Amino acid sequence: MTENTELPVVSHWIGGAEVSSSGGRRAPVFNPATGARTKDLVLADAGEIDAAVASASEAFPGWRDLSMAKRQGIIFRFRELLNARKFELAEIITSEHGKVVSDAAGEVQRGLEVVDLACGFPHLIKGGFSENVSTGVDVYSIKQPLGVVGIISPFNFPAMVPLWFFPVAIAAGNTVVLKPSEKDPSAAVWMARLWKEAGLPDGVFNVLQGDKQAVDGLLEAAEVRSISFVGSTPIAQYIYETAAKHGKRVQALGGANNHMMVLPDADLDLVADNAINSGFGSAGERCMAQSVVIAVEPVADLLIEKIRERMVNLKVGDGRENPDMGPLVTAAHRDRVAGYIDVAEQDGADILVDGRGFTVDGAEEGFWLGPTLIDNIPLTSRAYAEEIFGPVLSIVRVESFQEGMDLINSGQFGNGTAIFTNDGGAARRFQNEVEVGMIGINVPIPVPVAYHSFGGWKQSLFGSAKAYGVHGFDFFTQEKAITSRWLDPATHGGINLGFPEND
């Protein structure tokens, strides 16, 4: 695609400065609410990939060796700057992603929680010490950074997901190359400028704009020691296998198809509110959205009535005007989601509220799809089994708790789930037996707080490394165990070729 010289150009951030592309490849960036192309994005070629990795490699020794007190001070300053300017970042997110600006501000706030955690990193990377394990022998462990780490983030959370990883990586002494989504790339460069203002040395945090060429460049670069990724399951699997083949640590978080189970004793007004919040917030473009409601009979008809009553009043529009829901991120993604509604209808489901063909007056070219409610969706339908990633809420009717549990556990994903009930015994059984990594009990979007860790089961997580929390600091450090003895040369004990024993 040829460059439109009248539009702003979003560039790389390498070595502490914006760097344009020499290769000439460009991609368009849109405002989803209007459909207008608002910016051009540079796409990295081999030279820029090498430059970003080299910048991080050169910065690593100095950052690794900087005292923890000085590293901590820089992270604190970044935290204060981000907190003071978070609404500026939220507006940037809305302009490129389309989500409601208050939702974008919430995304930044959840990312800030991980920065808060990173501010206390000295406690989380300290080693252990055991004195006199054998006579005159001590054993202790230390945690050290990996080196250059790569982060590949998705379009749906252009600030929060990178913030899950890079504050932890930087606090632990690593340097970073972040590859943001091509759909909403500006947030990453904005945060890079903020790091520079906070005093982060040049090269510690780099932003590499690009497409699959940039992704593969990070996966294959010998200097990159680890890869962190969040996105769809097929890509997560590709990232995991390719990076592992090149000898890297990998945390690859994949897709989801989350189920909310509703028991007959649940407060159905609470359930209806939370089904709306979870299913249609951020236009359903959340990996933790509850896209399927499992209604344990006889509650389905009444619950559907309550959900429909609430859907009538939902306002959809330009996210800058703070409606309830904004557009989808691109026209292609809007059409993909609408295609799943077509599939559900062809398979015999009942489309109770149809968002296809929805438009907003005065912004007809925006990437609109209205909230959609589907009942009686066949379990054999692709629209049930696959991740739709849009404002589509499906109802599945079951006759018992066990039938609902079996349905959840039979799925390919295991990211998030929720149960709504006033029965503590049922909730306890659910949390013990459900095969899902993150569980809500009367909570619709169970994203763990920063000092726990985020990650699912089955096809929702490749490998065992979750994001942030203790898992995050373990992922971005490597441990050394040292056995130490200091003796007088006159009493060293002489030669002994036997295996050493503790005494």
Image (cartoon, rainbow, N blue to C red):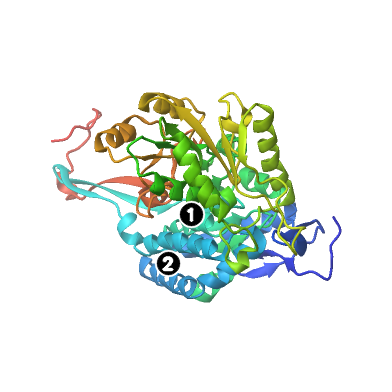
Q: Is residue 384 visible?
A: yes
Mark 2 residue type: Leu
- Local secondary structure at mark 1: helix
User: Which residue appears farthest toward the right when viewing the image?
Assistant: 2
Expressed as whole percent of the image width and height from the top left, the position of residue 344 reads: 64, 32
- State the residue at coordinates (51%, 70%): 86
Q: Quadrant of the C terminus?
A: top left
Left or right for 323, reference 450: right
- State the residue at coordinates (40%, 48%): 269
Mark 1 residue type: Phe
How crowded pointer 1 is (Cα within 10 Å; few <14, some 14-19, many 20+) is rated as many
Q: Which residue is mark 2?
A: 66
On residue 155, the disc is: none
Viewer-nearest residue: 474 or 128: 474
Residue 79: quadrant of the picture: bottom left
Which one is closest to the eye, mark 2 or mark 1? 1
Viewer-nearest residue: 400 or 492: 400
What separation in Å lies between label 2 and label 1 (alpha carbons)?
A: 20 Å
Expressed as whole percent of the image width and height from the top left, the position of residue 183 reads: 68, 55
Left or right for 58, reference 492: right
Expressed as whole percent of the image width and height from the top left, the position of residue 373 reads: 58, 41
How crowded pointer 2 is (Cα within 10 Å; few <14, some 14-19, many 20+) is rated as few
Q: Quadrant of the N terminus?
A: bottom right
Q: Is residue 467 visible?
A: no
Expressed as whole percent of the image width and height from the top left, the position of residue 492 reads: 18, 43
Q: Earlier in the sequence, mark 2 or mark 1?
A: 2
Q: Which residue is mark 1?
A: 165
Viewer-nearest residue: 401 or 312: 312
